[in-house]
Image: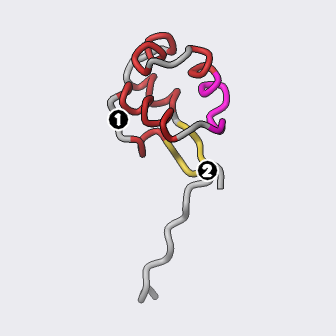
Amino acid sequence: MPIRIKLREVAQSKGIGQSRLSRLADMDVHMIQRLYRDPYANITLATLEKLARALRVELAELIELDPPLEKEPEAGGS
């Protein structure tokens, strides 16, 4: 199951552009641009953590399962 990195959405919701995010996360702007273009890119957990800290969000807010897991039916339902 693919994992999608929601970097663009989270950064835009906080009013943070690519250049500023690259400075806040101490990352090359080209890496940020790549993640904006390809939200399914393979990146390390350490990189995700740097981005989450820079955006001041929990790591879980940056990732999404694609497709999302479906809820299982409740037991005992009729």
The answer to whether 31 is drawn above or below residue 19 in the figure is below
Q: Residue 57 carries which label?
A: 1
Horizontal and vertical percent position of residue 38: 67, 31
In the rendered view, would you say 56 is above or below 70?
A: above
Reply yes or no: does residue 66 show up in magenta.
no
Of circles 2 and 1, which is in front? 1
Q: Give the range drawn in magenta.
A: 34-42
Residue at 42% across / 17% down in the picture?
A: 16
Q: Quick one: label 1, few (<14), some, or many (20+) residues within 10 Å? A: few
Give the farthest residue toward the top: 19
Q: In which quarter of the image is the N terminus?
A: bottom right
N-terminal label among 2 and 1: 1
| Marks 2/1: CA–CA distance | 20 Å
Determine the image quadrant of residue 32. top right
Q: What element carries label 1?
A: loop
* Residue type, label 1: Val
> Would you name the residue on which mark 2 appears?
66
Residue at 32 percent of width and 30 percent of height? 56
Against 63, is 72 above or below? Answer: below
